[in-house]
Amino acid sequence: MCSSVRKMIRLWIAALQLSELFVSSLVHVLYGFYIFSSAVAGDLSLALNELLFKPNNVDNVELVPCETSVAQATANGDLPPIVLVHGIFGFGKGRLGGLSYFAGAEKKDERVLVPDLGSLTSVYDRARELFYYLKGGRVDYGEEHSKACGHSRFGRLYEQGHYPEWDEDHPIHFVGHSAGAQVVRVLQQMLADKAFEGHENTTENWVLSITSLSGAFNGTTRTYLDGMQPEDGKTLKPICLLQLCRIGVIIYDWLDISWLKEYYNFGFDHYNFTWKKVGVWGLIDGLLGNSGPFASGDWILPDLTIQGSIRLNSHLQSFPNTYYFSYATKRTKKIWGVTLPSTIFGIHPLLFIRVLQMSQWRHPPDASSPYKGYKDEDWQENDGALNTISMTHPRLPVEHPSRFVKDDSECHPLQPGIWYYKIVEADHIFFIVNRERAGVQFDLIYDSIFERCRKHVFRKTPPTLPNQTQH
């Protein structure tokens, strides 16, 4: 009798898990289709508008690529550029047509760059790509790393860097969303370690400031809910959302439809995993998990587990001449001692289930704790993608200097080398893609970020702002 009851319970749990997987998969696919179709609709509308209302004097107009003009304006001006770095599944300028990952925030300042990095590639690979995007040249992933992961050493060629004069005298402000914040930290450490062959003069002082918006500093328990094994933070569960994602990405890359990959690219081109190069047997091998980025672990999800973040952070420093600021987001609150979603309609449908699940997460008792002193309750507050404790500042394995602030005025004058952080009521995608969702909060957040970069963060004398003269 008891064995029958236990069997029934196991069947019910399995049914619930499969139902949750189906719902999560459906929601994610629908959201992805919504983003893709919105981009296509926007492009078609723009093309139609240009066709119907084409100016008569178009032949007399000199066309200049927008991204190049921004780089030239940056190079010739006094202000350092502000580089916006997207997170997981993100995209930069030029992808998904006219859609903006940062919902148009880049228009708030005349010297802003929005690089397009691999949306699912590892933090390491994305940091390498970011360097060459700015400095110019062919992306070099490093000989040792490339051999270990089984991909080509060299990637995309940037014939003209977007900020080629980048150096200690011409530093940069970085703003990273989600995993993008960790990418910038890894890049700064690479600069300090002089890790770029042919660029032996790099230092950590090439980075003037790092602003994190819902930054993934210490990992997230969502990775385990999506399918990473909590025992090691590296391997995938046999049946999970990430397995479906893995299969979809492998097929997408293998088909190698050029116009589609120009529109959106997961960033694994350096694996040369296309039907022309690996054939049908290569596809089967990849789907079975024997080859490709998912087999080597050289993709973003292992870096976002708590264990993976600890591995990354053990080599990363916060530097004494760089300014750090972080916005940690949350959509939970305690009700009678229980952490629950703080609202229903204020959380994006893509994230609501995960907000609830993350607030109730319990690390498996039969798995070793990800670090000494781990407590489930510390990781319950979240924004649907990341735990709030992970977003404030680097904590693991060693806590970096930090200061909590309620108002921006509390941290002026800013001191370098300290992570100032605020906690904001918002879900993980509140300040990206769809500007209307955040409303006035969108402007308040980005205005404060850009104002801090322009007026409160500098090493020598305050720079001259556009339309402003020094007296």
Image (tube, grey):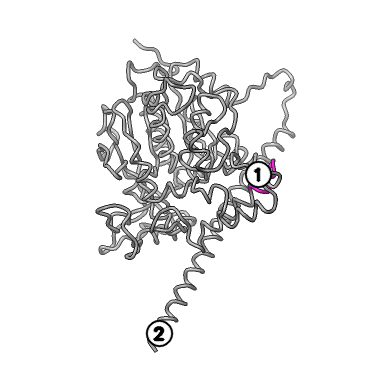
**Is 88 located above or below residue 344 in the figure?**
above
Q: Which mark is residue 40?
A: 1
Q: Quick check: is 257 in the magenta stretch?
A: yes
The magenta stretch spans which residues? 253-259
Graded by Cα atoms within 10 Å as few (under 14), some (14 to 19) or many (20 or more), the crowding at tag 1 reads: some
Q: Pinpoint residue 384: horizontal percent, then vertical percent.
A: 42, 54
Q: Quadrant of residue 394?
A: top left
Badge 2 element: helix
Residue nearer the viewer, 278 or 38: 278
Q: Pinpoint residue 170: horizontal percent, then vertical percent.
A: 42, 19
**What is the three-letter code of the residue carrying label 1?**
Val
Q: Pinpoint residue 115: horizontal percent, then vertical percent.
A: 52, 33
Q: Quick check: is 138 in the magenta stretch?
A: no
| Mark 2 or mark 1, whichever is nearer to me | 2
Q: Magenta span: helix, strand or loop, mainly?
A: helix
Task: Identify the residue shown where x is 53% and y is 22%.
Answer: 71
Residue nearer the viewer, 289 or 86: 289
Graded by Cα atoms within 10 Å as few (under 14), some (14 to 19) or many (20 or more), the crowding at tag 2 reads: few
Residue nearer the viewer, 290 or 37: 290
Badge 1 element: helix
Q: Which mark is residue 75?
A: none
What residue is shown with label 2? Answer: 3
**What is the three-letter code of the residue carrying label 2?**
Ser
Q: Residue furthest top?
A: 471
Quadrant the N terminus occupies = bottom left
